[in-house]
């Protein structure tokens, strides 16, 4: 059995997998063209979901399983990408630490005006102001998966009120309340931080639109760690330019890299991070907790034991 590993850290993955699975053939690469050429006899592909592109999948007639190294798999579940017989699994749940820490980076930096402090440092300008704290603030998290639970637990340690928005669950651990999406605009009005963790799907396209943004307090911040198209970026830009919300922390965009002429780059109340939410210096170790047991189950034909199955 041949396993194609397409990733910037493909060699690191293979350093873990080759000794554990000596009977398998592993092909590590970070080059899409090389991956396409090597896909012909691959039965398994391990890659970030968006890197297992339609043309690579099409070049793999023997493909039986794709292990996505991401929580989101919308790039692979789009119509016509994966053949019906190909199994798809994700690494849902392993990204909790880094996603939560990035959420706090954005919340603390926005709340305490870190960018202004940094500018003052460059100018050797001494300026002090009362420092707002997270304790007593309300975070509204849109999307109630494992990542949201992980973040909510840490928000409670900071003394925050946690409110969730989901159509799939009526309650969740570490949340003070959960509301359906139909009440999103009303709930957004309670938020000091409106944070997006909802997967992208047709029914979440521009879920955060002008109506939701208009409901937010002028002192509130929006943070997007979900998918770019979950948020109506044009509406967000208009609200930021008009001063209708206090600012935004953005790690994901509808077009990436974010074009240099996008006005978000030049807004003092916006923090841009380059789609790093799922990354960590222990990423291979984290994902191996799913990749290795899934590979063992797949080889043994125990498909029912595989973790995070998205489609059979």
Image: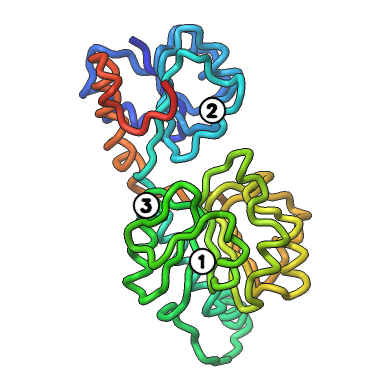
Side (left or right) of 226 relative to 237:
left
Q: Secondary structure at mark 1?
A: helix
Of the image marks 3 and 1, the number of the one nearer the N terminus: 3
Tell me residue 270's x, y (percent): 64, 67
Tell me residue 70's x, y (percent): 44, 38
- Residue under the point 40% across and 74% down: 160
Please name whichever residue, 39 or 195, is drawn nearer the observer in this view of the structure.
195
> Crowdedness of circle 2 by 10 Å Cα count: few (<14), some, many (20+)?
many
Q: CA distance from mark 2 to mark 3?
A: 22 Å
Looking at the image, is mark 1 or mark 2 nearer the viewer?
2
Give the vertical position of 77 relative to 152 (above or below).
Answer: above
Of the image marks 1 and 2, the number of the one nearer the N terminus: 2
Asked whether the beta carbons under mark 2 and mark 3 sit within 8 Å of each other, the answer is no
Tell me residue 277's x, y (percent): 48, 52
Asked whether the beta carbons under mark 3 and mark 1 sit within 8 Å of each other, the answer is no
Q: CA distance from mark 1 to mark 2?
A: 29 Å
Tag 1 residue = 106
Tag 2 residue = 76
């Amino acid at each position: 059995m041949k396993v194609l590993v397409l990733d910037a850290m493909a060699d690191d993955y293979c350093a873990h997998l080759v000794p554990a699975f000596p009977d398998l053939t592993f092909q590590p690469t970070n080059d899409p063209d090389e991956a396409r050429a090597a896909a012909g006899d691959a039965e398994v592909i391990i890659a970030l979901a968006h890197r297992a592109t339609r043309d690579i999948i099409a070049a793999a007639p023997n493909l039986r399983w794709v292990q996505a190294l991401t929580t989101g798999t919308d790039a692979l579940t789009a119509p016509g990408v994966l053949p019906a017989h190909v199994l798809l699994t994700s690494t849902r749940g392993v990204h909790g630490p880094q996603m939560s820490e990035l959420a706090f980076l954005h919340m603390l930096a926005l709340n305490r005006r870190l960018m202004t402090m940094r500018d003052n440092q460059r100018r050797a300008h001494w300026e002090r102001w009362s420092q707002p704290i997270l304790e007593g603030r309300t975070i509204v998290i849109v999307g109630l998966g494992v990542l949201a639970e992980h973040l909510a637990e840490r928000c409670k340690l900071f003394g925050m009120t946690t409110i969730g928005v989901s159509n799939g669950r009526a309650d969740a651990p570490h949340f003070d309340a959960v509301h359906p999406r139909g009440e999103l605009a009303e709930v957004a009005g309670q938020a000091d931080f409106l944070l997006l963790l909802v997967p992208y799907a047709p029914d979440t396209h521009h879920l955060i639109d002008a109506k939701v943004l208009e409901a937010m307090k002028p002192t509130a911040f929006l943070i997007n760690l979900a998918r770019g198209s979950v948020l109506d970026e044009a509406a967000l830009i208009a609200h930021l330019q008009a001063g209708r919300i206090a600012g935004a922390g953005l790690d994901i965009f509808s077009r990436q890299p974010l074009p240099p002429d996008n006005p978000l780059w030049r807004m003092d109340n916006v923090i841009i991070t380059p789609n790093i939410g799922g990354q960590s210096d222990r990423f291979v170790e984290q994902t191996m907790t799913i990749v290795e047991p899934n590979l063992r189950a797949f080889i043994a034909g125990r498909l029912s034991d595989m973790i995070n199955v998205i489609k059979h």
